[in-house]
Amino acid sequence: MGDVSIFLQHLTNGISLGSLYALIAIGYTMVYGILRLINFAHGDIFMLGVYLTYYGVVYTALPWWLVFLLAPVLTGLIGILLERVAYKPLRGSARITILISAIGASFLLQNLGIVIFGGRPRAFPVPQMLNRVIRLGGVSINIVTFIIPAVTILLLIALTYFTTRTKTGLAMRALSKDYETASLMGIDINKIISITFFMGSFLAAIGGILWGSRYPQLMPLMGSMPGLKSFIAAVVGGIGNITGAVMGGFILGLGEIMLVAFLPRLSGYRDAFAFVLLIIILLVKPSGLMGDKVTEKV
Amino acid sequence: MKRTIGLLLLVLMLAIASSVSAEVIKIGVFEPMTGPNAAGGEMTVEGIELALELKGEVLGNKVEIIVVDNKSDKVEAANAVSRLIEKDKVVAIIGSYGSSLSMAAGDIVNKAQVPTVGCSPTNPLVTLNNPYYFRVCFIDPFQGTVMANYAVNELGAKTAAVIQDVTQDYSVGLSKYFVDAFRELTGDQGSIVEMSSYNTGDQDFTAQLTNVKNKNPDIVFAPGNYGESALLIRQARELGIDVPFLGGDTWEAPEFLSIGGVAVEGAVFSTHFTAEAPVTEESEIFLAAYREKFGREANAFAALGYDAYMLILDVIEKAGSADSQAIRDGLAETTGFVGATGVITLDVNGDAVKSAVINQVDDGKFIYLTTVEPF
């Protein structure tokens, strides 16, 4: 292996990991952008999405591609339910209250996962079609590695279109500026919030399915680390900003891989890298790379 | 008249016996039932429960086991043994799968003077300088040498790469002993061409593996949790690394096969026992009972759990007392105890000196290759 192909291999690995973070970060950032709520249960919704897919593929006769579509829809509905139960009753209370409720929801989902799915890991049923390896020169690329960035970019474009060009998207943006005025303008707040949660959870499940295809080990606590990393990605990119989330994801993924690749002695600190990045961003540019400038009105 | 007196006496004796047997002997078990080591803990507990079913009474008293989940977490492991000692007042403890988890409990059982028998923690530090910690398995200096021998003598390896999990004392210790033995056997200090590390819970190993591929070793030694190891080997095969992967006893879990899929075919690892090569009469009894209860073949961890329980009961029986101190003293003198995994004699540190089994993954199953006697 030449030096160039090694670097290209590291680059491919980094892009693959980064686009996974990006995909999960989009859902995080969407919910935040509209509700100003950090949905800490996002990582656990991601976990539910993967498990639903697992049960769908293993225990039903449905073809895998149908399950890959149905499971995110079901996860989206669970997202709506979560909002109704854990966040809606607290709407209008202090932001810290809702944040604590989100942390509670996260623990609840994790422990429900342990009770229902069991503590032992399960193997994600990766479809044969996604389990192929392509070799280009000295570089080996799993087909999933191509699919993940493609899906991420596609969803990014679709979401940008949705939020800027459609009526619902407009309503979402209105809501993110001002609840009361938005509802006075005839926007059904409950409906829009439900749609937001549906989409956020749907995206988490898509991220989960691709994560499972790449790292086919399922555990009830599997959502917490990717959840945290994606949260960091969202903050780095500027929380609330969808393009920023994707950028943040790529920065984080590439950074982690390059850290382990070129400073192998520090490989035990790869998780620390993400948190150090978070601290630096919060110190230097708290609004994130793509974030809006927050101006205090007097 | 005589008969009525006899009957009365019998009833009286039974009444006394039952009032005595109302005293229950409590044995605590702390094992990982959730988290990255869950499969290992569950397999071990299966063996302990089977042993309890076969032998649920000692000195006329009922035995009760209290299982506490240590969640594969060092802090939880310390909490678990504290709970067993303070709340449940157990006389002895069994556990835990995972050397780091056992070491986290070591100080507590030592201070509380509650004898503890590890089933499969193989790091030497678990029992070292701890008069209350014992184990029924071999230790890593032996296991590491066994695998280095296999790599050099059977596979003809001249160079090796090592990938270790830096958060597991098991993985770090075993890697060190492997490296020492491999260097000595090849007579070449430079024979370990790459040494990289990861953390428990990592899912992506492509960066480490790309570096390993670049060094082109003859074999890769990668002891670690079954889940992480299976993902690691999967990613290695995707990257085009096609040399043999070697590991330790933690690989013996059904999850290693299901998560690893075709990628782990041919992987070789050392373990404590295999259903394919029973070693004692007790092995046969254990295997038959296991088959009847669970409807499948037993694994090494169930066998070690079974042995740990049976050893404690044997010691209580011989000492004629279920007092913690008496159990500790009895355990320290264990010689020639016939268990399912072999004949157990504990040395000065409280470690068993036993043979190792080498297994290989073949056609989605573990198959038995050979047995290596202790040197």
Image (tube, coloured by chain):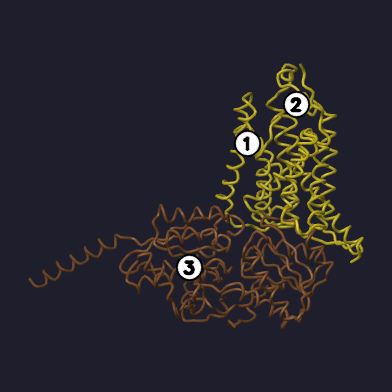
Chain colours: A yellow, B brown
- Viewer-nearest of labels 3 and 2? 2
Residue named by callout 3: B293
The quadrant where residue B364 appears: bottom right
User: Chain for mark 1?
Assistant: A
State which quarter of the image contains the C terminus of chain A. Answer: top right
Please say if A125 is above or below B243.
above
Residue that extends furthest to the front in the rendered view of this protein: B129
User: Chain for mark 2?
Assistant: A
- Whether residue B201 sits left or right of residue A256 in the image: it is left
Residue A94, percent from left and from top: 63, 26
Give the Cα distance between marks 3 and 1. 43 Å
State which quarter of the image contains the N terminus of chain A. Answer: bottom right
Amino acid type indicated by mark 2? Ser
Please say if A114 is above or below B365.
above
Q: Is label 1 on the same chain as label 2?
A: yes
- Whether residue B113 sits left or right of residue B42 in the image: it is left
Residue A84, percent from left and from top: 62, 32
Please say if A162 is above or below A114.
above
First in sequence, mark 1 or 2: give its number. 1
Amino acid type indicated by mark 1? Ala
